[in-house]
Image (cartoon, rainbow, N blue to C red):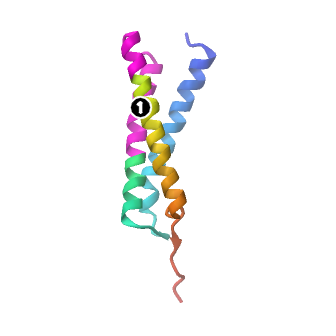
Amino acid sequence: MYENNQLVSIIMDCVYIAGSTILMFVPLSNKRIRERWAKAIFFVVGLIGVICYSVNFILNMRWVVISSHNSYEFYRWFNFVNGLLLGWLTALFFSGQAFGKKLPKKV
């Protein structure tokens, strides 16, 4: 039915979808303070990640089959979007907004 490398790819797509979903809800935590732009980037990165990896999951499961030329174009854009998301997450880490600041404890 599926080869080993396809099964690994399918499982990794599921992991990435779950991780992107969690990433969308990270800024909703009331335990840390983050800038508005950082919250927006977390949500956008999560949303785009869920969309991209869902489409990749559909293609890996072969529910939709596309031509070899379109497949090449899709994976080229997929890699571009992955690099863009990685760049945005790196910007969050370098700005210090990835972890945010803890709220002071109430006395």
Q: Is residue 26 visible to the viewer in this orientation of the structure?
A: yes
Q: Is residue 66 magenta?
A: yes
Q: Nearer the viewer, residue 58 or 99?
A: 99
Q: Quadrant of the N terminus?
A: top right
- Range covered by the magenta-colored residues: 46-73
Rendering coords of residue 58 (x, y %): 41, 23
Rendering coords of residue 44 (x, y %): 37, 49
Depicted 39 relative to depicted 106: above or below: above
Q: How many marks?
A: 1
Q: Is residue 63 visible to the viewer in this orientation of the structure?
A: no
Please tell me whether mark 1 sits on a helix, a strand or a loop: helix
Rendering coords of residue 62 (x, y %): 43, 15
Q: Quadrant of residue 56?
A: top left
Q: Residue at x 50, y 77 (%)?
A: 103
What secondary structure do most residues of the magenta stretch adopt?
A: helix
Q: Is residue 64 left or right of residue 9?
A: left
Q: Is residue 75 magenta?
A: no
Q: Residue at x 56, y 18 (%)?
A: 6
10 Å crowding of disc 1: few (<14), some (14-19), many (20+): some
